[in-house]
Every structure is written in structure tokens, then in C-alpha cells.
């Protein structure tokens, strides 16, 4: 993993890769993240930089890999998945978050989006299934509950270097 | 997480700290061992790259294929070490071993004449080819077929090796091993399906939150995954709308649809009976005509030999097309349509093998003369009928392999060439071929069922099956990489793993039936094979039990008697009912806890409202 990280840095900074920070656009060139529609959210969630430029240090990189590895428990995975899907960072998944999530899944073009009526029907169904306290949003515990009963989550939420 | 752990360390005593560090290092060691052992796993890198490019659905097909390779190989090792190896050792007299051929008593002489003609003298080259393809001639006398094992007792140095018993027990062992291994693999999938299958309304959350496969690294694959997710969500929503429409159907419409469905099922049964009848006639014709070889030249003879296999392959190809055409008129929901068509195709494939074997047996047991009745089987045409059955299974397997090769070479690759170089409308509309997972899975399950049935009659067949699957893996992989486009309708990995294993289990259970009938009901041939001195192949077991010490005999008789079997069966039923009741109780507890959660949130809202009211005053 250290090798992969140091390859991302320009040549002159490779010796002290432990303390250097890699800017966001370099991270996005990793093959595992390149095709991922959640790449920006992943960088935002795992980056600990103070100036909000979403750069990642080696520690952040390791954090990210450990969450996505096979040995992370489903608690950790669902916790981080919740943070990745929460587009406006308000601690809950409301309708706008879900809409952005579905648009990420279906693709970036105009013709690949669901129609308004379908989107409404879909969000209605999702909230019906997972919103237990019927407040119109999904909080962390509801999300973890629904994900723990999902059979594909563990196998799809992983990245192997 | 790390912060939490570091904060904890300050408060823990030394003993707990030591426990934690030792468990961490143990985990590291286990990880290393797992990593090392994963390098030994067959084709790990290939399957991983397929997963990255085409998703988990197709990857599950290749893991299934790898499982079958391992299973066939283990079956081969079993049969080889317990049956073939002792026979070869005793026949060639290695380690001072010898064997005995005891002519059977109380049997007419004519039943025991068997002269397989291994090729002697000058023969044409094409005879070898014909023998290789149809298992006759020089192959018939090798250890490939049942006829070689005409040994009634073998002595390896001074130990007496009961070959007939070993042959029968090895057969039971490989069947039991396959059964246990498949059940072990499917237990996980079963647990998931039982718990989650009830919750139909969880499917949307599963698709949205766990839909994106984070393993995908290729932008092309990502684009296709986007499209397939969009397609899947749209189909689900449409299905829901359809379900609502169905619930609002009037009585008249319901009547019309049910009568239409019954009519179409009758047509489907007619198609099936047509297939079965044609297989029966083809087998009978092939058996009758392949016995006078002198009147035919090489090609015609080969054609006649392979006629049953060709008819079966044709039926396996045509019947699914007809079924998928018919099901459109039955107006089911799309998911149910797929499942019903799949079930019908599975039934066709497995029943075809059954019909072939049935028609073979009707030929073998057809007895007009008294002499024939004395032997119990048609001794003139089939002095060694087990070898004949083994040859049919061998032909089926070879033909299956040739068809897979031919389809890949002559259909897939030209299609790809045509699509990339010719831009006329109809060709582009056909497009590249999709990797049909269910068709491919049915193909290899069909091959494995043949292997299971055939291993009793031809002990080296699993080796051929292993080599065949090995080559098929690479053929399919190359065909997938170069000629296929990813399926528009994605198949979820969790449900498909379980489904493949269930169908494989159906194939295994169906393989029990012909084997059971051959071993226990049809008299074994008196001219060849290890069961010459017994009535049927099963008769070895009672005979051996009679030779055991009386104490053990009593125990075994006790286990097999009714006094033991009935209470045992009742106890098993009770245990099953207990577990079902337990599962029901757990589900009720889950419902209650859910309701409690809803109550809690309502309490919270109520309290918050009270607080805000109190603050206002």
C-alpha cells in the first residue's frame, strides 16, 4: 500500500511520503477510484486536511483502505458508507441526499437519469423500507439496520488493491 | 476507531493489555497464512480480473466452474485409489500381488461369454479415431470401462482386497461426498435466502445502498454498470406498478388468463413429450443399428453411434427457445417469467438424460427367449451391459465438450468479427452476444450429472470431466473477454450462488435414481465386472455383512429394522418442528422490536414537544 501511495506523489517528495499530502486530483487517478461515482465523497470523507481541499495524507489513505478491506466489520463499513452517502453532511439522509445518490448510481448523462415520477416512487419506497421513525429522513441507526439485512453490502463495499 | 482504542488502553489493566496485543499478533499471523493459502487457490487472479470487468454475477459462474473442477478431481482420486489402482496392481503382479477370477456358480454358460474385440492386427487409422470417439474397440478393454474390473478377489502381498465391495463403497462414497460438499456450500446462501427472502420490501434499499460494486476499475465496465443499475431500478418500479394493476384485475380477465395458462402448459407438456419420444426412438435406433458394423462405412457408423447425443443436444437447444416464446403469452411478472422458464429448461435437460437411460434399459432388459430370461438381461446384444451404458455416458460427455468448443469457435468469434466489420442494420441489431449465465450454468450442471451417473460404469470418467472443465474455463474466459458484452439485466451474486447449488443438488438427486436402479434392481452382467457372482450389484453388501462377526451383524440388523427406523424418523421430525417453531418465534421477536423502535421515536417526539412547551412558559 505504501508503494501505491508513494507512486502518486511527484518524484521530489517521495522520500518523506509519510508526511506529505497528495492533492485530490492525484488521488482520483487511482484505478480503483477512477471509475467510482462516489470518488469525490470518498475523498471528502477520508481527508483530514484543515483547508477543505480534500487532500489525503498517508494516514488518510490507510484509513480508507482499511475501511474498504475485507477485514473491516460491517459496523465500520456502514458507518463510513453513511458518511459517504450524506451529500450535505448534515448527519441524516434526506430526500435531496437520496436523489443525488440515485443519480450517482444511474450515471452522469441526462438520458441516464430516472424520470421525476420514477424518482418520487423510488424515494417513497426507500423511505418506506428504512425510515422506522417516519420522520422523512434516514439517520445512522436506521441506515445501519437496513444495511445489516442487505446481503450484497459486504461484497460490494470493498476495494482490493 | 484508533482513537477509541488508544483511549481505552489507559484504563485497562496489564492483563487485558497483554491479551489485546497477543490477539492482534495472532490475527496478523492468521492473515499471513490466509494470504499464503490464497496464492494456492486455483485461478485466483483470473476470477478477480473477471469480477472487476464484468461484475459479481458472471464471477459467480466462474467460481462455480472452479468448484466443479475440484469436485470432479476429488471424485477421480477417490475412484482411482480404491478401484483402479488395486486392479492395475493385481493385474500386473506388482508387489507380489495376484487376482482371482472365480467363475460364477449356478449360472448358465451362455451368460458368461464376453469377447470384447480389442483391435488386433492391421487396422485402419480411422478405426482408432472411431474408437476414441465412441469408446469401443481398443478403449473398451482398458480400465476406462467397467469390463476391465473382472476381478473377484485380489491379493496385494498377503492382504485380501475385496474389490467388489470396494467398487460399490467407492460409488456410495463419492455420491455422499458430493452431497455433503454441495450442502455445506449452499448452507450460507440458504440462511440468507430464508431470512431475506421473506422481506420482499427490502429490495429497494439493497439495490440503492449496496448496488454499486466498488471493485469495478474499468471505466467501460463502470458505464455499463450505471446502465444496468438504471435498467434494474426502472424494471423494479415497473414491476411494482404491474403488481398493482394485477391486483385490480376483474373476474372475467382472471378467468381468461388462467385458461390461457392451462392451455400453454399443455402445449409445453406436449413439447416435452415430443422431445422424450424422439430421444427414445433415436436411442433404440442407434442401439439396433450400431451392432451390425460391417454394413456401414466409418462416417455413417459414427453418426449412428452419436445419434442419441445429437438428439439430446438439439432438444436442449430448441426447447428453451420454445419455452421463452410461449411464456410471453402467460402474462406473468418479469421475475417470475425468468424463474419459470429456467425451471422448465432445467427439467428438460435433466429429464433428457433420464429418458436416454430408460430407453437403454428397456433395450437391455428386453427378453423374449427363455435363455435370455435365465440371465436376466439381453445377453446376446449386451454381454457386458454396464460397459455399454458407460460408453453412452462417455459419448455424451465427449459430444457435449465438442459442442461447447464448436459453438465458441464457429458462432461466437465470427459473430464478433461480423459485428465489428459489417455495419448493416440487422447485424448491428443482433449485436454482440451476451454472456447468458443461466444457459452456461445449465450446460455445466448437465455435464456434471452425466459425470455422476457415468462414474459407476466408467471409473476414469471423472478424470475426463476434470480435464474438460479445465479447458472449458479457459475457453469461456477467452470468449467472454473478446466477444461478449455485459448483460443488460444484472444477476445478483448472493441469490445466484444459492440458485446454482440448488440446481446442482437437483442434478445429484436425479443421478441417484438411475444409479439406484442399476445397482439394486437390474441383474449385473455375468460375463464381466466385479459383480459376476452376485445377483445384483447391491448383493455384495448383504454377503459381506454375513461374513462379519455375529455381534456386529446383530447391530447392523437392528439399525436396519423397523423397530429402530420408525422412532428415529419421528425424533428427526420432532427436531425439525422445534427448529421451525424457533425460527417463527425469532421472526415475531424481530417484529416486536421494530414496533418498539417506532414507539421510542414517538416518545422522543412527545418529550421534545413537552420540553418546548415548558420552555415557552
Image (tube, coloured by chain):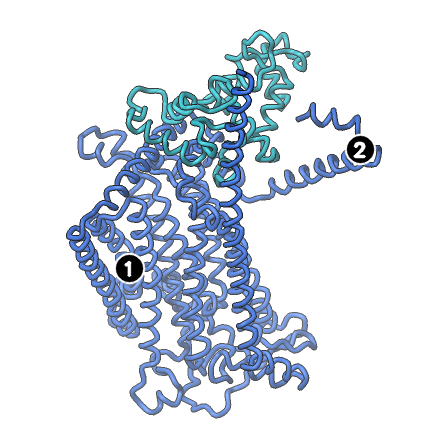
Chain colours: A cyan, B blue
* Chain bearing mark 1: B
Q: Quadrant of residue B58?
A: top left
- Circle 2 — which element? helix
The correct choice, above or below, for B454 with respect to B157 in the image is above
Name the residue nearer the viewer: B587 or B191: B587
Q: How many marks?
A: 2
Q: Position of residue B286 (x, y in %)?
A: 28, 69
Q: Quadrant of residue B333?
A: top left
User: Residue B310 bears which disc, if any?
Assistant: 1
**Residue at coordinates 50% horizontally, 68% vertically from top-left?**
B143
Name the residue nearer the viewer: B219 or B40: B219
- Circle 1 — which element? helix
**Position of the C terminus of chain B by quadrant:** top right
**Would you say residue B279 is visible in this rendering?**
yes
Q: Which residue is mark 2?
A: B17
Q: Are marks 2 and 1 on the same chain?
A: yes
Amino acid at each position: 500500500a505504501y508503494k501505491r501511495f508513494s507512486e502518486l506523489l511527484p518524484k521530489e517528495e517521495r522520500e518523506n511520503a509519510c508526511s506529505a499530502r497528495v492533492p485530490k486530483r492525484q488521488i482520483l487517478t487511482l484505478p480503483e477510484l477512477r471509475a467510482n461515482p462516489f470518488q469525490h465523497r470518498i475523498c471528502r470523507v477520508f481527508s483530514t486536511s484543515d483547508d477543505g481541499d480534500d487532500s489525503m495524507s498517508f494516514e488518510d489513505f490507510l484509513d480508507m483502505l482499511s475501511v474498504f478491506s475485507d477485514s473491516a466489520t460491517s459496523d465500520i463499513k456502514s458507518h463510513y458508507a453513511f458518511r459517504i452517502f450524506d451529500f450535505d453532511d448534515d448527519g441524516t439522509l434526506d430526500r435531496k441526499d437520496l436523489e443525488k445518490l440515485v443519480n450517482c448510481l444511474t450515471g452522469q448523462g441526462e438520458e441516464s437519469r430516472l424520470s421525476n415520477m420514477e424518482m418520487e416512487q423510488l424515494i417513497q419506497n426507500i423511505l418506506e423500507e428504512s425510515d422506522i421513525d417516519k420522520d422523512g429522513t434516514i439517520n445512522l441507526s436506521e441506515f445501519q439496520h437496513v444495511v445489516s439485512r442487505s446481503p450484497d453490502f459486504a461484497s460490494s463495499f470493498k476495494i482490493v488493491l | 476507531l484508533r482513537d477509541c482504542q488508544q483511549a481505552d488502553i489507559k484504563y485497562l489493566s496489564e492483563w487485558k493489555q497483554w491479551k489485546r496485543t497477543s490477539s492482534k499478533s495472532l490475527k496478523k499471523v492468521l492473515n499471513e497464512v490466509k494470504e499464503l493459502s490464497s496464492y494456492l487457490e486455483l485461478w485466483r487472479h483470473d476470477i478477480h480480473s473477471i469480477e472487476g470487468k464484468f461484475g459479481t454475477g458472471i464471477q459467480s459462474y466462474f467460481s462455480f466452474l472452479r468448484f466443479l473442477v475440484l469436485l470432479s478431481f476429488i471424485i477421480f482420486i477417490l475412484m482411482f485409489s480404491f478401484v483402479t489402482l488395486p486392479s492395475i496392481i493385481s493385474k500386473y503382479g506388482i508387489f507380489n500381488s495376484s487376482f482371482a477370477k472365480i467363475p460364477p456358480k449356478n449360472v448358465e454358460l451362455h451368460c458368461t461369454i464376453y469377447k470384447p474385440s480389442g483391435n488386433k492386427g492391421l487396422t485402419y487409422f480411422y478405426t482408432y479415431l472411431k474408437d476414441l470417439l465412441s469408446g469401443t474397440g481398443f478403449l473398451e478393454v482398458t480400465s476406462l470401462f467397467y469390463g476391465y474390473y473382472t476381478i473377484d478377489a485380489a491379493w496385494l502381498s498377503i492382504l485380501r482386497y475385496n474389490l467388489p465391495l470396494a467398487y460399490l463403497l467407492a460409488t456410495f462414497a463419492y455420491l455422499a461426498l458430493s452431497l455433503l460438499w454441495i450442502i455445506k456450500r449452499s448452507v450460507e446462501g440458504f440462511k440468507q435466502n430464508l431470512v431475506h427472502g421473506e422481506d420482499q420490501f427490502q429490495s429497494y434499499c439493497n439495490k440503492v445502498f449496496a448496488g454499486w460494486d466498488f471493485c469495478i476499475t474499468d471505466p467501460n465496465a463502470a458505464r455499463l454498470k450505471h446502465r444496468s443499475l438504471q435498467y434494474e431500478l426502472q424494471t423494479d418500479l415497473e414491476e411494482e406498478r404491474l403488481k398493482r394493476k394485477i391486483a385490480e384485475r376483474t373476474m372475467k380477465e382472471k378467468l381468461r388468463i388462467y385458461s390461457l395458462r392451462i392451455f400453454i402448459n399443455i402445449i409445453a407438456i406436449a413439447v416435452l413429450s415430443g422431445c422424450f419420444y424422439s430421444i427414445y426412438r433415436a436411442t433404440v435406433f442407434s442401439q439396433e443399428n450400431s451392432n451390425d458394423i460391417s454394413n456401414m462405412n466409418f462416417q455413417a457408423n459414427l453418426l449412428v453411434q452419436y445419434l442419441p447425443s445429437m438428439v439430446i443436444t438439439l432438444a436442449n437447444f430448441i426447447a428453451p427457445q420454445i419455452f421463452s416464446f410461449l411464456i410471453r403469452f402467460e402474462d406473468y411478472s418479469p421475475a417470475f417469467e425468468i424463474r419459470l422458464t429456467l425451471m422448465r429448461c432445467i427439467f428438460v435437460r435433466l429429464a433428457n438424460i433420464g429418458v436416454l437411460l430408460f430407453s437403454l434399459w428397456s433395450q437391455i432388459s428386453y427378453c423374449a427367449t427363455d435363455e435370455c430370461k435365465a440371465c436376466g438381461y439381453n445377453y446376446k446384444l449386451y454381454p457386458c451391459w454396464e460397459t455399454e451404458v458407460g460408453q453412452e455416458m462417455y459419448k455424451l460427455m465427449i459430444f457435449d465438450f465438442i459442442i461447447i468448443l464448436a459453438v465458441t469457435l464457429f458462432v461466437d468469434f465470427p459473430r464478433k468479427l461480423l459485428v465489428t466489420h459489417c455495419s448493416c442494420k440487422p447485424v448491428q441489431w443482433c449485436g454482440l452476444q451476451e454472456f447468458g449465465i443461466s444457459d452456461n450454468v445449465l450446460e455445466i450442471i448437465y455435464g456434471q450429472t452425466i459425470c455422476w451417473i457415468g462414474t459407476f460404469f466408467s471409473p476414469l470418467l471423472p478424470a475426463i470431466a476434470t480435464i474438460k472443465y479445465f479447458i472449458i474455463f479457459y475457453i469461456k474466459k477467452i470468449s467472454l473477454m473478446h466477444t461478449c458484452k455485459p448483460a443488460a439485466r444484472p444477476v445478483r451474486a448472493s441469490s445466484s450462488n444459492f440458485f446454482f447449488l440448488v440446481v446442482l443438488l437437483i442434478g445429484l438427486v436425479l443421478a441417484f435414481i438411475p444409479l439406484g436402479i442399476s445397482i439394486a434392481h437390474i441383474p449385473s452382467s455375468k460375463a464381466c465386472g466385479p459383480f459376476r457372482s452376485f445377483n445384483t450389484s447391491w448383493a455384495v453388501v448383504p454377503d459381506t455383512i454375513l461374513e462379519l462377526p455375529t455381534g456386529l451383524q446383530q447391530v447392523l440388523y437392528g439399525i436396519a429394522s423397523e423397530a429402530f427406523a420408525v422412532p428415529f424418523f419421528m425424533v428427526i421430525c420432532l427436531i425439525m418442528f422445534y427448529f421451525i417453531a424457533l425460527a417463527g418465534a425469532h421472526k415475531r421477536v424481530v417484529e416486536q422490536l421494530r414496533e418498539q423502535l417506532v414507539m421510542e421515536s414517538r416518545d422522543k417526539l412527545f418529550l421534545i414537544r413537552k420540553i418546548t412547551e415548558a420552555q415557552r412558559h
